Image (tube, rainbow, N blue to C red):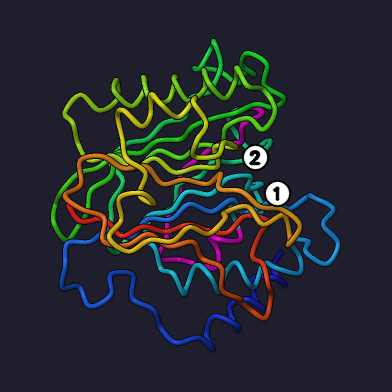
Amino acid sequence: MKRFIIMVAALLASLPLVEAKGDGASESLKVMSYNIRLGSAKDGTNSWNLRYAATAEMIKDQAPDVFGVQEALSYQVLFIEENFRNYECVGVGREDGKKEGEFMSIFWNKKTVSMLKWGTFWLSETPEKPSMGWDAACFRTATWALMKDKKTGKKFYFVNTHLDHKGKEAQKNGLKLIVDRIAQINPDGYPMVLTGDFNMEPDNSNLAELDSKMQSARKIAAKTDSHDTFNGWGRGKGIIDYIYVSGFSSCPEYQTITKRYADRKFVSDHYPVCAKLIF
């Protein structure tokens, strides 16, 4: 890992500096969702040790104020922390609520955003402790944080999740639990951002309740795209990664990040998705 950090530090130093807030002229907040692809996966030429530099270059280039990752193992979270000292993060391993298993971590640029409180719950019938719910194939969690934009002084919530890839009841009930929890943790009605890999296409009926409470940034953005978010290393397709929002005055831009980084065609088997939001 130390060797990775030194190599990537050299790579980042060669890149032009990127400011997280652009010219600072607007009250915008840039958010991102990124399924990083778990580092232990046997992906051959797309393995983590061959694409970590591309991940670092992508984060520096996109410079989100806040972003959520899915599937990150503890050493992948540490990699981002060590290479981006201007970011802090919260999150837990889904297997034990500590370090084991995948993290649904939330990262924020501490120059532009502060974190006030946070928590994690499991998508199950017993959400306060590590557990699998309904017909899920895996432990599933959602991590949330109450944040404050330093430029405007406005508070907002950021929630990050990864719904089950097999269990249909787990998908339906997990998303319903998230919608219910959002209402519970946000009684003051602050703006809300929900990011994640939902493992559902936009026409899935299980999204109906969420659609009644929040809006898909992809659908409402003044400038948007229709790219697939799942690429399967060039062998897959589908829109399954989302940014949902509520309480913001507008969403001027949504983008699926398909560009090359560090001469890699893919930074993951999912493309990152970004949105710019106006308070």
Compared with 249, 168 (above or below) is above
Q: Which residues are magenta?
A: 79-96
Extreme residue toward the front, this view: 203
Q: Are marks 2 and 1 in contact (CB under 8 Å)?
A: yes
The label shown at residue 237 is none
* SS category of the residue bearing label 2: loop
Disc 2: which residue: 102
Compared with 106, 19 (above or below) is below
Which residue is found at the position 55% from the left and 64% from the top?
82
Is residue 165 covered in magenta?
A: no
Q: As rendered, which of 190 and 103 lies closer to the eye?
A: 190
Disc 1: which residue: 38
> Mark 1 is on which residue type?
Leu
* SS category of the residue bearing label 1: loop
Point out residue 201 in the picture as x, y percentages from the top left corner: 55, 39
> Mark 2 is on which residue type?
Glu
Compared with 200, 209 (above or below) is above
Q: As rendered, which of 99 and 112 lies closer to the eye?
A: 112
Which residue is found at the position 47% from the left and 72% from the top?
60
Q: Earlier in the sequence, mark 2 or mark 1?
A: 1
Q: As rendered, which of 142 and 272 lies closer to the eye?
A: 272
